């Protein structure tokens, strides 16, 4: 299938101009802060109270805001974007079920956990190409090194600098220059833009389950006058254009509303010099970056970009981790059914025929991860403790992770055996032998979780 984005000529200029305003409003407040070494705790700083936002949403984004919570846009009349992407939970699912009911009668369920819509506005389009070395290494700048030496907290270990991460090996590849899938939206990257992503659930049978004629009629009735005022009266008689403009409005809402990318976590305050990490948080950050321990930053990049963009905690690349099968997903009752990520079942393009990509799913952002209730593409885990335990014990103690049948551990039981070679078995914390000690102790796991809690938006340093 084609995933080429459809952006109509009359709104290209609008899109670029609005994007520039949004990026400026998000990042300028950080530019005056101090970019600190990731283990250096500064003396307490009197942080000014942030000024209130002064930029309103554009007219098209306000339409998208209204559509986002409008259940009339679903065939059931009971499902909206916000039903799965709850604004009260950082636009992630609010419940603990791995999949969400949908369909015309809310009697069908999905196959994957609902991803957050937060921090999606900088996601690049899906590509397959050489690895970018700048995304595989985390090297401290001279400024960071200096800050670390001058401002380190006495309670933090001396090794808390931003450690270089070893190059991450793509499953099935052994060299840094090997082709790597990167970018795109959804767990399998099949949509290139927020507009494409917004349009998809409208017609998916187990989500909003609409037909195009039915959706177009609802849009005419509920939003026709507002859309015609922006895009011309002809939009109402042009069904593809009407639906595309509705998706565009939803995309603009996600781009313009700062709540989708608030950059207001304790970690952001720490980067700007307005907060200090606790000893546990600082130890967790060190373990997060240590290529021999957590090694989390190899995929969940935590460095500020050269242009000042705060870290998004993802490299947008894909990995096969071998998480266990989730029996709570109804589709998994069929032992012959498997979710192969880039290989389908949701993708149907040339990528889906590349067997070395089977079992690979996109690395999600870790921002607001501590507020999630289900983890990984199949929602198999319901706590960060379970997630850390999986990383720490998958290889050394697999019987604690996978089911045992007839005395044999069913390792990597959610992926057909012919694709097991795609699973990462070399990069820390993986690669340990059975019977070895866990890659991370319980104390170390607790410290990493303490750090992950600093990535939750809504921290107010001036109140602490």
Image: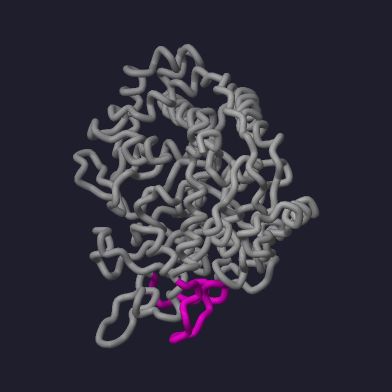
Of 307 and 378, nearer the camera is 307
Q: Quadrant of residue 395?
A: bottom left
Of 427 and 337, nearer the camera is 427
Q: Quadrant of residue 337?
A: bottom left
**Where is residue 52 shown, x and y percent of the image?**
55, 22
Report whether residue 382 is seen. yes
**Where is residue 75 shown, x and y percent of the image?**
26, 34
| Image point (78%, 50%), residue name | 143
> Viewed as shown, does residue 176 lie left or right of 327?
right
Range shown magenta:
415-441
Query: Magenta segment, principal secondary structure?
Result: loop
| Image point (40%, 12%), residue name | 225
| Image point (63%, 64%), residue name | 157
Display coloring: one colour
View extreme (right): residue? 142
Of 372 and 345, nearer the camera is 372
């Amino acid at each position: 299938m084609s995933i080429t984005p459809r952006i109509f000529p009359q709104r290209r200029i609008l899109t670029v101009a609005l994007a520039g305003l949004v990026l400026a409003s998000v990042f300028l407040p950080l530019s005056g802060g101090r970019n600190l070494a990731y283990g250096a705790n500064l003396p307490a700083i009197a942080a000014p109270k942030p000024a209130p936002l002064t930029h309103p949403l554009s007219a098209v984004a306000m339409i998208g805001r209204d559509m986002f919570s409008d259940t009339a846009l679903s065939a059931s009349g009971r499902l909206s974007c916000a039903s799965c992407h709850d604004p009260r939970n950082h636009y992630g699912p609010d419940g603990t079920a791995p999949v969400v009911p949908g369909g015309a009668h809310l009697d069908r369920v999905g196959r994957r956990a609902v991803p957050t819509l937060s921090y999606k506005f900088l996601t690049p389009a899906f590509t397959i190409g050489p690895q970018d070395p700048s995304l595989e290494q985390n090297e401290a700048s001279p400024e960071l090194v200096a800050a670390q030496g001058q401002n380190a907290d006495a309670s933090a270990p001396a090794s808390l600098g931003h450690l270089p991460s070893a190059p991450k090996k793509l499953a099935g590849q052994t060299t840094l220059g090997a082709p790597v899938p990167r970018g795109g939206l959804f767990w399998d990257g099949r949509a290139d833009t927020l507009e494409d992503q917004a349009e998809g659930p409208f017609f998916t049978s187990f989500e909003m389950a609409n037909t195009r004629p039915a959706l177009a009629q609802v849009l005419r009735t509920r939003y026709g006058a507002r859309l015609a005022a922006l895009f011309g009266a002809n939009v109402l008689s042009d069904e593809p254009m009407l639906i595309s403009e509705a998706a565009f409005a939803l995309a603009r809402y996600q781009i313009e509303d700062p709540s989708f990318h608030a950059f207001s976590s304790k970690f952001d305050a720490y980067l700007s010099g307005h907060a200090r990490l606790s000893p546990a948080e600082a130890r967790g950050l060190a373990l997060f970056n240590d290529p021999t321990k957590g090694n989390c930053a190899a995929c969940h990049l935590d460095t500020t970009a050269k242009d000042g963009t705060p870290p998004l905690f993802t490299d947008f690349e894909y990995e096969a981790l071998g998480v266990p099968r989730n029996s709570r997903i109804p589709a998994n009752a069929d032992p012959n059914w498997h979710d192969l990520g880039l290989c389908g079942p949701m993708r149907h393009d040339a990528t889906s025929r590349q067997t070395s990509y089977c079992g690979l799913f996109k690395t999600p952002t870790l921002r607001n991860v501590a507020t999630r209730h289900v983890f990984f593409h199949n929602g198999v885990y319901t706590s960060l403790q379970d997630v850390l335990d999986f990383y720490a014990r998958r290889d050394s103690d697999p019987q604690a992770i996978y089911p045992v049948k007839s005395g044999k551990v069913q390792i990597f039981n959610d992926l057909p055996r012919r694709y097991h070679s795609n699973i990462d078995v070399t990069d820390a914390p993986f690669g340990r032998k059975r019977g070895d000690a866990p890659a991370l102790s319980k104390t170390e796991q607790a410290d990493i979780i303490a750090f992950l809690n600093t990535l939750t938006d809504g921290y107010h340093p001036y109140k602490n």
